[in-house]
Image (cartoon, rainbow, N blue to C red):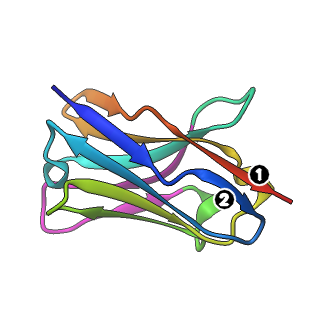
Amino acid sequence: QVQFVESGGGLVQAGGSLRLSCAVSGIILSNNAIGWYRQAPGKQRELVATLTGGGMLNYVNYADFVKGRFTISRDNAKNTMFLQMNSLKPEDTAVYYCKVIVGRTDYWGQGTQVTVSS
């Protein structure tokens, strides 16, 4: 059974930082691609960052609107993925979801709310 525990969301002022965590059980993160997505009210869910897995080289992809501000990472020993978010803007306000891709199946976390005040 795959289980996710997301944490780290909250309310922060513009310019501040948050670190999202997503602890996963039932899937070995190092073997699979992972990602963070977000969904703002009234908008579609969008990609924030992805990180490949299962090989010697890890490729990272960031959405243009977070490049230079957000960092995706993975702690294989803890089977946990992270999203470090710096220089937050009000437009970053959304529910953030972690995802693990196993073959053709996507597994999603429950989401954590991030609110950035101006």
Q: Nearer the viewer, residue 3 or 105?
A: 3
Q: Give percent across and percent down for residue 73.
A: 35, 64
Q: Nearer the viewer, residue 77 or 47?
A: 77
Name the residue beneath numbered marker 2. Answer: 65
| Mark 1 vs 2, N-terminal side | 2
Residue 43, placed above or below residue 29: above
Give yes or no for residue 42 being in the magenta stretch.
no
- Is disc 1 placed on a helix, strand or loop? helix
Q: Label 1 neighbourhood size at 10 Å, few (<14), some (14-19), many (20+)?
A: few
- Is disc 2 placed on a helix, strand or loop? helix
Residue 98, placed above or below residue 13: above
Q: Quadrant of residue 43?
A: top right
Q: Label 2 amino acid?
A: Phe
Asked if residue 80 can be seen in this view, the reply is yes
Position of residue 59 in the picture relative to residue 27 (left or right): right
The residue at the point 62 percent across, 51 percent down is: 10
Position of residue 48 in the picture relative to residue 34 (left or right): right
Alpha-carbon distance for marks 1 and 2? Answer: 10 Å
Q: Give percent across and percent down for residue 59.
A: 31, 63
Residue 91 circle label = 1
Mark 1 or 2, closer to the camera: 1
Q: Give percent across and percent down for residue 94.
A: 66, 42
Which range of residues does the magenta coloring cover? 46-62
Pointer 1 with pointer 2, Cβ within 8 A: yes
Outermost residue, right side: 118
Quadrant (top left/top right/bottom left/bottom right) for the N terminus: top left
Quadrant (top left/top right/bottom left/bottom right) for the C terminus: bottom right
